[in-house]
Image (cartoon, coloured by chain):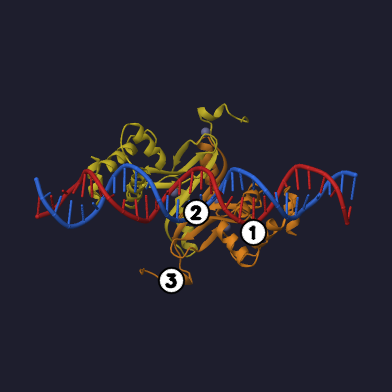
Chain colours: A orange, B yellow, C blue, D red
Amino acid sequence: MESEELRNVGLKVTTPRLKILGLLEKATARHMTAESIYRQLTESGEVIGLATVYRALAQFEAAGLITRHHFEGGQTVYELERGPHHDHIVCVRCGRVEEFYDKVIEDRQREIATKLGFNLSDHALTLYGECSGPDCAGKKKQG
Amino acid sequence: MESEELRNVGLKVTTPRLKILGLLEKATARHMTAESIYRQLTESGEVIGLATVYRALAQFEAAGLITRHHFEGGQTVYELERGPHHDHIVCVRCGRVEEFYDKVIEDRQREIATKLGFNLSDHALTLYGECSGPDCAGKKKQG
DNA sequence: CCGATTATGATAATTATTCTCACGTGAAAA
DNA sequence: TTTTCACGTGAGAATAATTATCATAATCGG
Ligand SMILES: [Zn+2]
Ligand SMILES: [Zn+2]
Ligand SMILES: [Zn+2]
Ligand SMILES: [Zn+2]
């Protein structure tokens, strides 16, 4: 139950928090912006403030329930922190996001940080390119 | 001469552009924000508009003269595109930025993109951690 | 030097996010 | 249950970063 998740991290169980967590669970879109979360909830009849969405997301992130990513183009997305760590590759044409995990890269990062005298605490790796998905395949070389 | 650089990429040689390029050359700080560039120029007596700084930076980036990086904490920095590609490691405490290049990681990225059906065009890799520099060494565990 | 074109500075407008605050709610205690 | 009160919430104001507007000014080929 989502209520448990909230209690486990010391957050009161409130309707807005449950709605937001619930939305993120419905893997409809693993990566959502604060705005899209607000919009989806509002459009489905919920009465919620955008500020509440931002507040909840910040708390969830601090509690480790979700992760935030800054992609180019100014979009900041959030996703549930379920399963192991992974990084992203974003299609610069259609915006599709895929995930990947590469042990070699992860290990190298730690080595590099150590070599430079840093105590690695986090990292952000995002690849950008054109994908071959249905939304992109036919759009080559056109406006 | 910086004027050459501008002409080579098809940009008119203007005072603001020269001042900004010049500032970036004076490796005083390899990584600068639009605001810091504006401030330094203004404080040194130049009359320049912040909008002009943003415009010039965008044009320089489009022309490949400089590169832009989005770091956590909302800071967007620009740096001259001189020498080979590199990524960054940022100290989360003092903000110090170091650069590194790792062939293993660069190669893996390309392989990963290919495997996922993407035509890799760019990537952003930033490591975060605490450094052992002079500004940080003594600040452990204190506010 | 001249004029068409492009750039610039001041400032308004946008966008994304955070803050403020009066009011509402969760949950521990009575 | 009811009480209590710290904490959460919605609406909208306030910030911060970036972009757009526009009248004026500078660039540069002729
Ligand atoms: Zn990773
Ligand atoms: Zn993801
Ligand atoms: Zn790289
Ligand atoms: Zn440091």
The chain ID associated with circle 3 is A
Q: Is residue B142 left or right of residue A9?
A: left
- In the image, B17 versus A94, the foreground residue is B17
**Of helix, strand and loop, which one carries label 3?**
helix
Q: Earlier in the sequence, mark 2 or mark 1?
A: 1
Three-letter residue code for mark 3: Ala
- In the image, B8 versus C26, the foreground residue is C26
- Judge depth for marks 2 and 1 and give the one in front: 1
Q: CA distance from mark 3 to mark 2?
A: 21 Å
**Of helix, strand and loop, which one carries label 2?**
strand
Q: CA distance from mark 2 to mark 1?
A: 32 Å
Are callouts 2 and 1 both on one chain? yes
- Judge depth for marks 1 and 3 and give the one in front: 1
The chain ID associated with circle 2 is A
Please state, as top left, top right, bottom left or bottom right, where the N terminus of chain A lies in the image. Answer: bottom right
Crowd class of label 3 (few under 14; some 14 to 19; many from 20; radius 10 Å): few
Three-letter residue code for mark 1: Ile
The residue beneath circle 1 is: A48
Residue under the point 37% across and 34% down: B40
The chain ID associated with circle 1 is A
The residue beneath circle 2 is: A126
Residue A105: which numbered mark, if any?
none
Q: Position of residue B63 (x, y in %)?
A: 31, 51
Three-letter residue code for mark 2: Thr
- Based on the displayed image, in which of its 4 quarters is residue A16 positioned? bottom right
Residue under the point 65% across and 65% down: A26
- In the image, C10 versus B50, the foreground residue is C10
Please state, as top left, top right, bottom left or bottom right, where the C terminus of chain A lies in the image. Answer: bottom left
Q: CA distance from mark 1 to mark 3?
A: 38 Å
Q: Position of residue A95 (x, y in %)?
A: 48, 63
**Of helix, strand and loop, which one carries label 1?**
loop
